[in-house]
Amino acid sequence: MKSFLPFLPVLGLALLGGAEMAYCQPAPGTMAMPSLTAPAVSHFPGEEMIDVAGRRLQVLRGGQGSPTIVFESGLSRTLADWSKVLPEVNKLASTFCYTRAGLPPSDPAPPGPRTALVIAEDLHTLLSRAGIKPPYVLVGHSYGGASMRIYAIKYPAEVAGLVLVDPQNEGMLVRARAIDPKMASSQLPVLSEADRARLPSGMVQEMEGSDAMWSSGDLGIAGKLPPVPVVLITALKTGLRGGPEADPDLRLKRQLHDELFQGVDYGMHVVTDRSPHNVMGSEPGLVVSAIRFVLDAANHAPRGRPKPVAIRLSADQLAPLLGEYVDSKGQHVSVVATDGHVFFQALGTPRTEIMPESETSFFTPENLDARFVFEKDAAGKIASFSLVFGRTKAATFFGPRR
């Protein structure tokens, strides 16, 4: 099944506050890499230290129910990065969050580079040692998104779904150099001897492991993601007057995320211009909603519904639906018709054709579980429409305004 790719902005999600993260805000045309600042050592009520091959790793569990939601932080980051997300996600299902070896308070890792493949294999061992049985919904941020993709490819039978939060793409540096050598020059962090002495060993090892991926453009494993629900979140916030299109780094990231999502069988790609790279700090509600969507899709398997049949509506039937709609956060979208074909378009995104199955319900051939449902008021006039994925209402827009 081909994936639904509307490139929606973030819709109707309440912001729950920010979290301080040690990520650089890159200048236009530069790569978004972590700063050379060690994360603070954090402890949490109920945390455990689980032994894996003689190394004790910090683990935090919560919630109850299956599948278990497993979190992986970004390059050289700890489980503290998920502190704004966990309280809500713990209400949905069992959760498992940890700090990787070499990053305090976890014990040091064995010598050698910590590649995304090594991290995925270590997580597999840790889950087994902790007694956490599959299936899992894997949630990975940044470099953790790369390791969660590897986990899903290497252990597909264990995975019920994925949420990729502004994931790093292995092709970013290679593609940037191909576009403009100056764009990617000297963007990988250079570790001095002083850096190696002052930073946690795991931070140095992860930077060494990530260098190989970014320099080669190779994820480190062959294969494709399993046919499970996936949400990919792309963060495009920028301070430039021209917006994301004025930043070549953000343009390239979006292109690479587009290509990554083309390999997804079922899911949703959400683009937000409200967050920089640390989405779970600036928009935790968005990450929670993405996890909820994947859980719902995994638990209820909505793809078994009969294939819809498109009908033809007259111009008079279409006219009440057309115009501009707006959600509670001020996001604008348009519904337009051309030569009898109906299109949905969010501001600054490609338009998507939607096909009527009734006078008020439309679908898209790319994903038969996505519905655009128009709602009437008490007087029988169109007052809003909702975007529905499977059993989840993702957003509601009010209008139309002409």
Image (cartoon, rainbow, N blue to C red):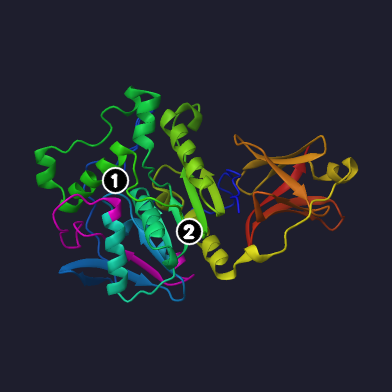
Which amino acid type is marked by label 2?
Pro
x and y percent of residue 335 in the render? 73, 41
The answer to whether residue 274 of the structure is visible from this angle is no
Q: Quadrant of residue 400?
A: top right
Residue 167 x %, y %: 40, 47
Q: Quadrant of the C terminus?
A: top right
Image depth: mark 1 or mark 2 in front: 2
Task: Examine the structure image and report whether residue 65 is included in the region drawn in magenta.
Answer: no
Which x, y percent locates residue 202?
A: 19, 53
Q: Residue at x 36, y 42 (%)?
A: 170
Residue 310 appears anywhere in the view: yes
In terms of secondary structure, where does tag 1 sit? loop
Predominant SS of the magenta segment: loop
Going by the image, does 389 lie left or right of 40? right
Relative horizontal placement of residue 49, taking residue 74 as reference (left or right)? left
Which residue is painted at 43% across and 49% down in the image? 279
Q: Position of residue 190 (x, y in %)?
A: 19, 35
Question: Alpha-carbon neighbours of circle 2 within 10 Å: few (<14), some, or many (≥20)?
Answer: many
The numbered disc on residue 226 is 2
Q: Which residues are magenta?
A: 88-117
Disc 2 element: loop
Q: Is residue 207 above or below residue 227?
A: above
Rendered image quadrant of residue 25? top left
Identify which amino acid the numbered label 1 is placed on. Answer: Ala
Q: Residue furthest front?
A: 222
Nearest to the observer: residue 232 or residue 284:
232
Mark 1 highlights which residue? Answer: 22
Residue at the spot 16% in from the left edge and 51% down from the top edge: 112
Please tell me which residue is depicted at 32% across the width and 76% down the height of the picture.
Answer: 131
